Amino acid sequence: MTKAYLIGILHDATERKYTYRVTQNDESFIYFITAMIRKMGYNAWIYREGKSRNVYVVEFSKFILRDAKIETRQNKIDYVRGYFDAEGSVPKKPGARMYIYFAQKDKKDLEEVCSFLTELGIKCGKIHNPSKKNDPCYWRFFVRCESYRDFAYLIGSNHPRKKQVLEMVI
């Protein structure tokens, strides 16, 4: 994986003075991110948040992404994959109607991801707020049904649960 992927997953991260913290309840995904960072030649550390919580954290230095940019086609693919792994969704229940969507409070971020997907040939729905009454700052967009297979092939996922659902689309 690349630095572009890490930039994508930062949308679900906490920023500290010198580090980024990515939290997940899926421990294997946290180990995947850690292994990826170490494979790039940097250090990352893992810990569990609280004694009884199933929340795992990988923390790593901001220095890793100091000069990282999203410029090439492959960077855009990796970035969107990371963003999807952090802020995207697919059905959790087996047998549920298939969907692929991205959600985020930062509308500009979503517009960028939607733009990258469109540039890559993936058809997307409109960015919308599903409930202005409940949360006026919450935005999402769906990948169109006719692009599910293209999304699964081109973007895919490294998140264990999402990866499994997308493999069923292929």
Image (cartoon, helix red, strand yellow):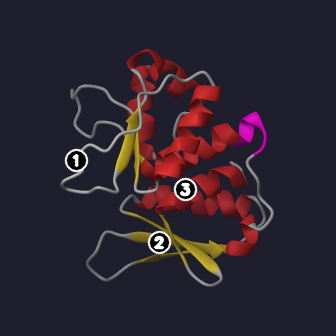
Residue 14 in sight here: yes
| Picture residue at 65% right of the left edge, 37% below the top | 77
The residue where tag 1 is placed is 131
Question: Whole-percent x and y of residue 48?
Answer: 41, 76
Position of residue 75 relative to residue 53, above or below, is above
74 shown above or below 7: above
Instruction: Name the residue beneath numbered marker 3.
Output: 9
Q: Which residue is drawn at 78% across and 44% down?
A: 71
Among numbered discs 3 and 1, the one appearing first in the sequence = 3
Image coordinates of residue 62 in percent, x first then y, are 68, 73
Amino acid beneath label 1: Ser
- The numbered dot on residue 40 is none
In the rendered view, does 76 fall on the left or right side of 109? right
Residue 113 position by quadrant: top right
Residue 101 seen in render: no
Magenta stretch: give its range.
71-75
**Residue at mark 1 to residue at mark 2: CA–CA distance:** 31 Å
Image point (74%, 68%), residue name = 64
Give coordinates of residue 66: x percent, y percent.
77, 68
* Helix, strand or loop status at disc 1: loop
Q: Residues within 10 Å of mark 3 (few under 14, many from 20)?
A: many
Q: Is residue 161 magenta?
A: no
Q: Is residue 131 above or below residue 48?
A: above
Residue kind at label 3, given as amino acid type:
Ile
Magenta-drawn stretch, dominant element (helix, strand or loop): helix
Mark 2 lies on residue: 57
Q: Which residue lies furthest to the left in this view?
A: 133
Q: Earlier in the sequence, mark 3 or mark 2?
A: 3
Query: Which of the 4 image quadrants contains residue 32?
Result: bottom right
Most extreme residue toward the top is 146
Residue 161 lies, in percent from the top left, at 38, 43
